[in-house]
Image (cartoon, helix red, strand yellow):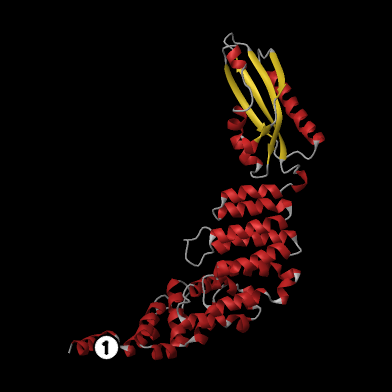
């Protein structure tokens, strides 16, 4: 008896004739909600009502939801025509909204067909952008096959290729890593290799909610470390940034070893460092001391990271005793060369500029009547 009552109550709420009338009489602002109500009541009626309803329907959240209902009702042509009438920004938003509803088979099937149905519009209207979160096997096959389209190898189409690559990486996650690694090590254009490296961030979904579809950061990190030697040295900062973004800061530091490969001597870089010891003695006199020396590092850190740690490392290895001798207070400023030295001549040139700055600044200090310099023993950073 209760089932009969429930069915009767639903029938009272779901009067398809009245709901169809609501759709026909609704304003453009209200028609999407009216259509949704009809589709939830009677899909056959919704299918037949779709052409006239979508001819008057506005874009927006309600329109996007109505489009999903219409596709589920089998009104594909009405939705397709509605999308074609939207301006580019509205269409992009609607396509993305549909891409997020791929749990509906009708929506996924509709999107699968756009590559062939739309032709050039697949690119110009950026239909591919709506596929990033649509993770059905058919969509992933479409993305994989489109990525190998020979036309995308043409120079004029490279922006399309990399736009699609971002979507492909985000959609396939771990399954995209193998292709990204292949591209990052085989593309002839070095700048394009750097763009592929950035796509690892899309695979891991950097900045996203950490969904289960994202690539494992550990897998992506291991791949990027294999990619690093194949990158042009000037591209290494991009790879470093990507590793940091996916949560692998230690790995990001380690790729410094590939940044200046020709400067590695016996497995280490040699940097120049200075420490300017400015001491105000108890009697008011100022003593300035210019400390300098080599710093050896095995390519496990970037220079800016080393600079941040320089006071601690040099402070425990170099001798700063002027303040103790004159019962004064010391102010010590540390500097590290921004790159490892290429040779002895470049080291001397950098040191000479640092010395000139020291002499100029010392000359400007009132009562700076004493200054000297001292060569310090080399510091082996990795043993510090």
Asked whether 40 or 210 is in front, the reply is 210
- Figure check: 235 above or below 23: above
Horizontal and vertical percent position of residue 370 = 69, 13
Residue that badge 1 annotates? 11
The quadrant where residue 318 appears: top right
Asked whether 343 or 163 is in front, the reply is 343
- Figure check: 363 above or below 91: above
The quadrant where residue 127 appears: bottom right
Q: Is residue 205 visible?
A: no
Q: Is residue 184 left or right of residue 5?
A: right
Taking the spot 59% from the left edge, 73% from the top edge, the residue there is 128
**Quick one: SS at disc 1?**
helix
Horizontal and vertical percent position of residue 58 = 47, 76
- Figure check: 218 above or below 92: above
Q: Is residue 215 visible?
A: yes
Give the farthest residue toward the top: 283
Give the farthest residue toward the right: 345
Taking the spot 60% from the left edge, 32% from the top edge, the residue there is 313
Give the farthest residue toward the left: 1
The quadrant where residue 172 appears: bottom right
Asked whether 314 or 187 is in front, the reply is 314
Asked whether 339 or 150 is in front, the reply is 339
- Figure check: 365 above or below 174: above
Viewport quadrant of the N terminus: bottom left
Horizontal and vertical percent position of residue 335 = 66, 32
Viewport quadrant of the C terminus: top right
Taking the spot 66% from the left edge, 18% from the top edge, the residue there is 288
Horizontal and vertical percent position of residue 46 = 41, 87
Taking the spot 65% from the left edge, 43% from the top edge, the residue there is 302
């Amino acid at each position: 008896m209760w089932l009969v009552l429930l069915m009767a109550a639903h029938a009272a709420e779901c009067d398809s004739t009245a709901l169809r009338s609501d759709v026909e009489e609704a304003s453009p602002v209200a028609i999407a909600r009216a259509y949704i109500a009809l589709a939830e009541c009677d899909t056959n009626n919704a299918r037949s009502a779709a052409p006239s309803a979508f001819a008057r329907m506005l874009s927006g959240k309600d329109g996007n939801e109505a489009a999903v209902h219409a596709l589920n009702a089998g009104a594909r042509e009405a939705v397709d025509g509605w999308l074609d009438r939207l301006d580019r920004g509205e269409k992009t938003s609607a396509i993305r909204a549909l891409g997020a509803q791929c749990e509906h088979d009708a929506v996924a099937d509709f999107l699968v067909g756009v590559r062939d149905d739309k032709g050039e519009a697949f690119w110009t209207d950026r239909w591919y952008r709506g596929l990033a979160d649509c993770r059905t096997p058919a969509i992933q096959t479409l993305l994989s096959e489109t990525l190998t389209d020979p036309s995308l190898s043409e120079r004029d189409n490279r922006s399309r290729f990399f736009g699609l690559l971002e979507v492909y990486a985000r959609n396939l996650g771990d399954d995209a890593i193998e292709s990204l690694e292949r591209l990052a090590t085989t593309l002839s254009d070095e700048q394009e290799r750097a763009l592929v490296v950035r796509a690892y961030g899309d695979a891991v979904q950097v900045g996203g909610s950490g969904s289960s579809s994202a690539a494992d950061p550990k897998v992506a990190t291991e791949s990027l470390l294999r990619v690093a030697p194949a990158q042009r040295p000037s591209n290494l900062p991009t790879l470093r940034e990507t590793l940091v973004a996916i949560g692998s800061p230690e790995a990001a530091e380690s790729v410094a070893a590939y940044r200046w490969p020709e400067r590695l001597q016996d497995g280490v870089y040699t940097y120049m460092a200075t420490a300017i010891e400015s001491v105000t003695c108890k009697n008011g006199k100022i003593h300035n001391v210019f400390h300098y020396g080599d710093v050896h590092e095995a390519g496990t850190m970037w220079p800016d990271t080393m600079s941040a740690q320089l006071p601690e490392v040099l402070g425990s290895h170099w001798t700063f005793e002027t303040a103790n001798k004159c019962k004064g207070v010391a102010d010590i400023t540390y500097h590290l060369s921004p790159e490892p030295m290429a040779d002895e001549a470049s080291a001397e040139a950098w040191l000479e500029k640092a010395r000139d700055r020291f002499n100029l600044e010392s000359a400007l200090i009132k009562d700076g009547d004493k200054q000297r310099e001292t060569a310090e023993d080399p510091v082996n950073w990795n043993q510090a």
